[in-house]
Amino acid sequence: MKHLQATFLFLSSSTIFVEAFTTTKPSSLHLPCPKLSSTATNDQSQKSSSPVELIGDKCDRGGIILDEDAMLQKQNFAISPEELIAKAKYALKKDSGVLEPTLWAPDFEFCAPYIGPLPANEFLDAADGFNIYDAFPDFDNRYANFSVDPLEPGRVWFFVRLIATDTGGLFGKEPTETTVQLPPQVFSFKFNEDGLIRELTVGYSVDRRQGDTGGVGGMFGLFYGVGQGLPFREGQPVKPSFRFRFFTKIGNVVSKLSKKK
């Protein structure tokens, strides 16, 4: 039960736990994102509603290949794309700010697919509760592909591939000596115009076929990879529902019958 207690700590409080796993309010599970479309709004701290001019090459169907350099230049954000990426890399060297919380804005929030948003104090409590570097001394987040969002000012996106070996024992259990490789994930920082981190998002897997966890990312993926998968759906690999499988089979049958006509 120790791993469950630590998970509950990561959920930060009984209030957040109840909201996330009993009432299942969407607002408590997902970080609000700007609505992006051909009239995407320029999200200057959610205050401006003026449309953003899209610059780029229109696809033959369904989209536009944005001219990122031109759009970033038109943002007129206080910090250049190069500086934003440099700030993101520095923050990662400081464990996303855990080792240097002054990198965070006063209204800092952490958000993962099923956890958060959490304010700074609750996020720090959760980070301290896991002792993840003791369990996985070779914990190796491999960061790459940094880019600045041409539609959302101040947002830096990057990819992460995590490999770690359970040689220290997770939550007091005997080490399994298991090496876990998580699927590629996308993380992000959002900086305000003072260069402080307003948002940290983590754990969003982009290819469930890769790695050892069936697509489960973040800490949940590590638990699952060493054989201590958490006893709820969010901590397990995605499994299509009965209803989805049922309608897929019906669709396949209808498609085959229509081709015979």
Image (spheres, grey):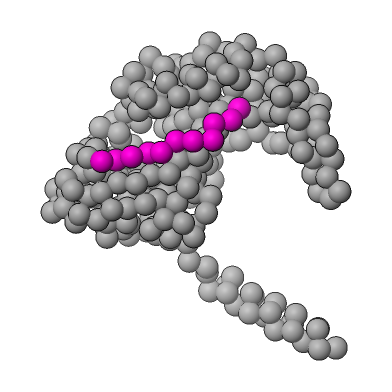
Q: In which quarter of the image is residue 40?
A: top right
- Please state the extent of the stretch shown in magenta in the rendering: 138-148
* Quadrant assignment for the N terminus: bottom left
Q: Is 114 or 207 nearer to us in this picture?
A: 207
Q: Residue, x 86% and y 48% (percent of image)?
A: 60
Q: Can residue 107 be seen in this view?
A: no
Comparing 179 with 258, the one in front is 179
Quarter holding the C terminus is bottom right
- Position of 62 with respect to 240 (left or right) is right
Q: Quadrant for residue 248, please give it.
A: bottom right
Task: Report x, y in % for residue 85.
Answer: 53, 23
Q: Which residue is drawn at 75% across and 80% down?
A: 255
The verdict on residue 147 being magenta is yes
- Decide if residue 162 is in sight here: yes
Give yes or no for residue 227 being in the magenta stretch: no
Judge left or right: residue 61 versus residue 43.
right
- Locate residue 132 relative to residue 81 in the image: left or right: left
Residue at (58, 19) in percent of width and height: 82
Spot occupied by residue 204 in the image (x, y as percentages of width and height):
49, 45
Most common secondary structure along the magenta stretch: strand
Foreground residue, 35 or 75? 75
Q: x, y (%) of residue 250?
A: 67, 80
